[in-house]
Amino acid sequence: MNSMKYSKGKKLFGILLIVSISMMLVLSIISGLSGEFARAANLKLILVLFGFSVAFSGIYLIQNHCSTTKPSIKILISLFGLALAFLNTTAVYNVLPFVKLYNWLISGTIIFILLVQLQLLNWGNQERLIMKLLSVILVLANLALIVFFIAKWSFPELSLLINISILTGLASFILGLIFSKNNSNLNR
């Protein structure tokens, strides 16, 4: 009975993810075809759906692909993602000031994505040195991005740092997934 509830929860976030991405794509196409006559309400809704899509995709990945992660950690990360999505919604509809909050929302989203990535890489439970190294590189690359957005730096020279941080984080995550997949195949 308990596994049935858990299975329904997994499916629920998968369905919510598909619905939010589908609605976001449809609204984006409609707004794109409308050109300069695009409605502001549609653009706001696209931003809201984007925030929920990020949260639902992270929750879905954690629920379905992180079997070694403790349930309490899964719940905390999921709640953090949902809180960010709701904060994004309040900022988009000017309940909270968007101009003062957007850097913090971007930084929070990077932290959420980093937490999901670390769970997918089985952070802390890896015995291989290469996996530990890739995880540390991923954390450092994302920390550089977080500090950049929190500090609101606007130097043009820092665009190279942003690009390097993004590419380094992405490369270390992809390599980490490849090495962890190879490691799980070797253990079978």
Image (cartoon, grey):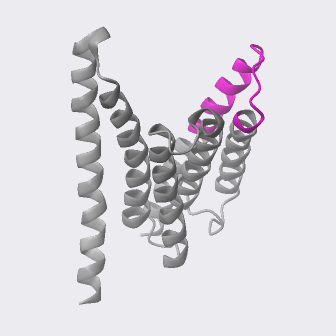
Residue sitting at x 72%, y 51% = 136
User: In terms of depth relative to the viewer, which is nearer, 181 or 140?
Assistant: 140
- Residue drawn 56% across and 46% down? 109
Q: How many marks?
A: 0
Is 116 placed left or right of 22 in the picture? right
Looking at the rendering, the stretch of residues picked out in magenta corresponds to 149-171
Q: Which quadrant of the rendered structure holds the N terminus?
A: bottom left
Tell me, yes or no, whether the highlighted magenta stretch contains residue 164: yes
Q: Is residue 88 above or below residue 1?
A: above
116, 173: nearer the viewer: 116
Name the spot of residue 139 as percent of width and height, x first.
69, 48
Identified at 49% across, 48% down, the residue is: 178
Compared with residue 33, is residue 145 higher up or lower down, i.e. above or below?
below
In this rendering, would 164 be left or right of 80?
A: right
Tell me where residue 12 appears, x and y as whole percent: 26, 64
| Most common secondary structure along the magenta stretch | helix
Q: Nearer the viewer, residue 84 or 94?
A: 94
Q: For residue 169, which quarter of the picture?
A: top right
The furthest residue to the front: 95
| Relative vertical location of residue 92 with respect to residue 35 in this rendering, above or below | below
Quick check: 109 left or right of 7? right
Q: Position of residue 163 (x, y in %)?
A: 65, 24
Quarter-of-image position of residue 188: bottom left
Q: Is residue 165 magenta?
A: yes
Counting from the top left corner in percent of width and height, residue 36 is at 31, 9
Pick out the residue farthest to the top. Answer: 36
Which residue is drawn at the image coordinates 73% and 38% (left, top)?
A: 150
